[in-house]
């Protein structure tokens, strides 16, 4: 809530699309901040749903403290439980901030697609409108310091590497540090894994397995991990969780942080080693998304399995 | 395990007390590193217990990889389940690294006191021998940025402060940052809450409620939180989790980090505010320890309740 950049992003988008007469729906109200913003911009009515009873009560207290009782209604329920008859009419604007460290980590697309069909006007504005999930290989020795061990003082400790799991996504917050508080370097241009238009996209339309190729930046380096971040936008304003875009914005770092998948060059589950990305070479990767699109796994393809 | 400062501390202490003929017991072997060090220093035998079956298997693999099979025995059990008949004889040296972010967070004193009576010689060396739990008030605006909110853009959000819980200890890792990666300042000399001599201390002898007074350093400031850290020693070498002592030692920061209790000057559970510590003033606090001494709560005493 102290993420002024995020708050400003929503305020600017709401200011463009909310005016007298607007009916606004919010999914996942939390503190109620976005609904309060919409009401202050002159919306005729705002209805917000919040799945936590405690948070819904606090959002109501915030609405009252700002003199907006009667203009903003906070309902304690999931958006999938909200019925059209509970709204004055279909909403013209849908606003939500239900993204996780991974874009779809909190099932934003499922909730938005459901509401879009049942509760919005045909040409309703969805804020944010577009979003893209990125992945980029990074060189970050800190990650190796934390996650890898081979020996100390001449003692062979390499068996401990069996505990290192390169197949899973972990979160920088689990390790107890912000990625941008330690040295790291992007080793290629970020790869857009998928892009969403919240006014049309469905989960079924997202690919579950796909390949991409990647060219190394500059002189290359040791790729310790994939770092995942996302950008949400209305086409002009953006909100990003990239480690480059969260410098000096601690609340975003500590709220979302980044998702990380350790990179294993050898497909060797017992002794994973960082992948060396050489200058001027092209590498081929395959992406696997879980059924709910919440978990992502990227794997290096041997040159023999290259796509055309 | 990549904490070279910690590893060096144990190596130096073991080198002083382990020699040919020594019988060494380790509690909580983890990787087996400390047992391997003891064996390399010439111990006649080393027995280590480890509560996790997976970790015990990995420790055995590390022992074998270092050619110490037969000299180091890793047993999968809790130390309280270990019987004297399973050792060649009572051990001369007990070594353990079973400390948490709070010194007694992993019940080190209970495990050590139990083993001391049942499995050690009368004059056995316990490594480390002494340990002290410290608390110190810090000024750290970052903590306020993460945990406190009052308004944004003229919108009153103060009701969200009900979520801020100043009674609990949280850990820097939960917030996803290392304390020493952000600006902070000690506002007084650290307070030693309790000191242990592992060769004699018992949990029953630790006070559960006690008062202390504190004088502000320099010009004082806003005390956002108590930071808890500990120092273990044999009387000369030390191992510390102070945020000042973990700079450039990332593995310690991400393993132990620091424990934090937000400070509330008003005893106002709805709207806690940092305590302003004024230059040259003395403040009185009361410390409450839970039955198991794992949780600690420090509370400001109104001047009327001052101790003599």
Image (cartoon, coloured by chain):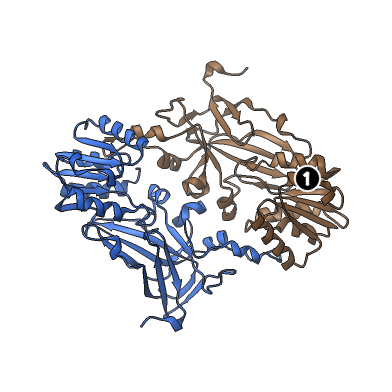
Chain colours: A brown, B blue
Q: Is residue A300 left or right of residue B135?
A: right
Q: Is residue A260 left or right of residue A75?
A: left
Quadrant of the snapshot with the N terminus of chain B? top left
Please tell me which residue lies in front, B287 or A137.
Answer: B287
**Which quadrant of the view contains residue A133?**
top right
Please tell me which residue lies in front, B284 or B81.
Answer: B81
**Residue B277 appears at what percent x and percent y?**
47, 75
Q: Residue at x 55, y 17 (%)?
A: A305
A186, above or below A9, in the image: above
B190, above or below A28, in the image: below
**Which quadrant of the view contains residue B26?**
top left
**Residue A223 appears at what percent x and percent y?**
49, 34
Q: Is residue A249 left or right of residue B47?
A: right
State the residue lying farthest toward the top: A304
**Residue B239 appears at what percent x and percent y?**
30, 54
Please tell me which residue lies in front, A228 or B75.
Answer: B75
State the residue lying farthest toward the left: B21
Provide the secondary structure element on which disc 1 rests. Answer: strand
Whether residue A128 is visible to the viewer of this picture, yes or no, is no
B154, above or below A220, in the image: below
What is the chain letter for disc 1? A
Can you identify the residue that label 1 sits on? A126
Q: Residues within 10 Å of mark 1 (few under 14, many from 20)?
A: many
Whether residue B180 is visible to the viewer of this picture, yes or no, is yes
**Residue A15 appears at what percent x and percent y?**
79, 55
Q: How many marks?
A: 1
Q: Is residue A283 left or right of residue B230?
A: right
Quadrant of the snapshot with the C terminus of chain B? bottom left
């Amino acid at each position: 809530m102290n993420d002024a950049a995020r708050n400003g992003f929503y305020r600017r988008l709401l200011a463009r699309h909310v005016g007298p007469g607007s009916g606004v729906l919010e999914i996942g109200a939390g503190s109620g901040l976005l609904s309060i913003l919409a009401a202050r911009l002159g919306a005729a009515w705002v209805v917000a749903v919040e799945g936590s009873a405690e948070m819904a009560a606090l959002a109501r207290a915030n609405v009252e403290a700002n003199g907006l009782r009667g203009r903003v209604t906070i309902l304690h329920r999931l958006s999938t439980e909200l019925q059209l008859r509970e709204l004055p009419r279909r909403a013209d604007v849908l606003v939500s901030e239900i993204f996780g460290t991974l874009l779809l980590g909190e099932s934003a697309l499922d909730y938005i697609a459901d509401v879009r069909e049942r509760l919005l006007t045909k040409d309703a504005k969805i804020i944010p409108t577009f979003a893209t999930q990125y992945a980029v290989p990074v060189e970050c020795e800190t990650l190796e310091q934390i996650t890898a061990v081979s020996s100390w003082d001449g003692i062979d400790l390499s068996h401990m590497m069996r505990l290192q799991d390169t197949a899973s996504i972990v979160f920088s917050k689990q390790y107890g540090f912000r990625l941008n508080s330690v040295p790291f370097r992007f080793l290629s241009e970020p790869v857009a894994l998928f892009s969403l238009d919240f006014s049309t996209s469905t989960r079924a339309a997202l690919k579950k397995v796909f390949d991409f190729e990647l060219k190394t930046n500059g002189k290359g380096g040791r790729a310790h991990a994939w770092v995942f971040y996302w950008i949400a936008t209305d086409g002009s304003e953006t909100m990003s969780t990239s480690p480059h875009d969260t410098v000096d914005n601690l609340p975003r770092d500590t709220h979302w942080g980044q998702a990380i998948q350790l990179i294993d060059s050898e497909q060797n589950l017992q002794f994973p080693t960082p992948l060396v990305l050489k200058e001027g070479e092209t590498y081929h990767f395959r992406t696997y998304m879980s059924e709910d699109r919440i978990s992502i796994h990227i794997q290096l393809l041997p040159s023999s399995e290259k796509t055309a």
